[in-house]
Image (cartoon, grey):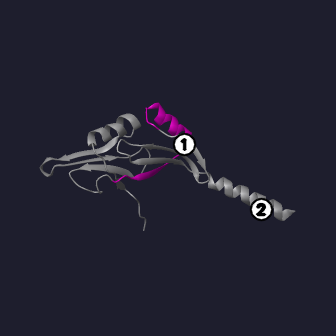
Amino acid sequence: MDYKIELIPISVTDIDRTKAFYEDVVGWPADQDQVVEEAGLRFVQITPPGSACSFCFVKGMSMLGEGVKQYIQVVVADADAAHDELKGRGVEVTEVEDLPWGRFTHFEDPDGNHFALQELPDYAAGLAAREAAAASVSQD
């Protein structure tokens, strides 16, 4: 059986400001913006382009403790391109950092929820290089 993460709640203080940040600044559209007047409930869901997993923020229902910050890691094909796109949109984004487990750039939303954008390393290329080196040593 497959288990697929679908939705991650984040804590926000101003639902309109946060929705505008993701739609207008980051460029990630809201899939859902539902209001249930009689329950005093509003649910907004954002799905980054190409992602199978969304995040949401809710007014009128507690999914997280107040002030809880989330750390969400998003995989991108090109960390430099993601950095440049977000910076061009006015997002305060960190410089791209090269680490053994990938290349990262980071940003936070107005409530301090942290997004790490990771370009995965090419593990297949690394494995092929190690196998080629091992084969060359065994032939000597």
| Quadrant (top left/top right/bottom left/bottom right) for the N terminus | bottom left
| Quadrant (top left/top right/bottom left/bottom right) for the C terminus | bottom right
Q: Amino acid at mark 1?
A: Ala
Examine the image and state in which quarter residue 128 appears: bottom right
**Between discs 2 and 1, the one toward the N terminus:** 1
- Badges 2 and 1: C-beta atoms under 8 Å apart? no
Residue shown at 37%/56% (left/top)? 6
Check residue 12 in the rendering and tell me which mark sits there, or answer none. Answer: none
Q: Residues within 10 Å of mark 2 (few under 14, many from 20)?
A: few
Q: Amino acid at mark 2?
A: Ala
133 over 82 or under it: above or below: below
Could you say whether the residue bearing mark 1 is in a helix, strand or loop?
helix
Q: Rounded to the nearest whole Å, what is the CA distance between mark 2 and mark 1? A: 31 Å
7 over 96 or under it: above or below: below
Q: Residues within 10 Å of mark 1 (few under 14, many from 20)?
A: many
Q: Position of residue 2 (x, y in %)?
A: 43, 65
Residue shown at 46%/36% (left/top)? 86
Check residue 134 in the rendering and tell me which mark sits there, or answer none. Answer: 2
Examine the image and state in which quarter residue 135 appears: bottom right
Residue shown at 68%/58% (left/top)? 127
Instruction: Give the number of the mark in front: 2 or 1.
Output: 1
Q: Nearer the viewer, residue 88 or 28?
A: 88
Looking at the image, which residue sits at the far bottom? 1
Q: Position of residue 38 (x, y in %)?
A: 12, 50
Q: Nearer the viewer, residue 35 or 2?
A: 35
Residue extent of the magenta highlight: 68-92
Q: Position of residue 137 (x, y in %)?
A: 82, 62
Q: Position of residue 82 (x, y in %)?
A: 50, 39
Q: Is residue 125 magenta?
A: no
96 over 102 or under it: above or below: above
Check residue 79 in the rendering and tell me which mark sits there, or answer none. Answer: 1
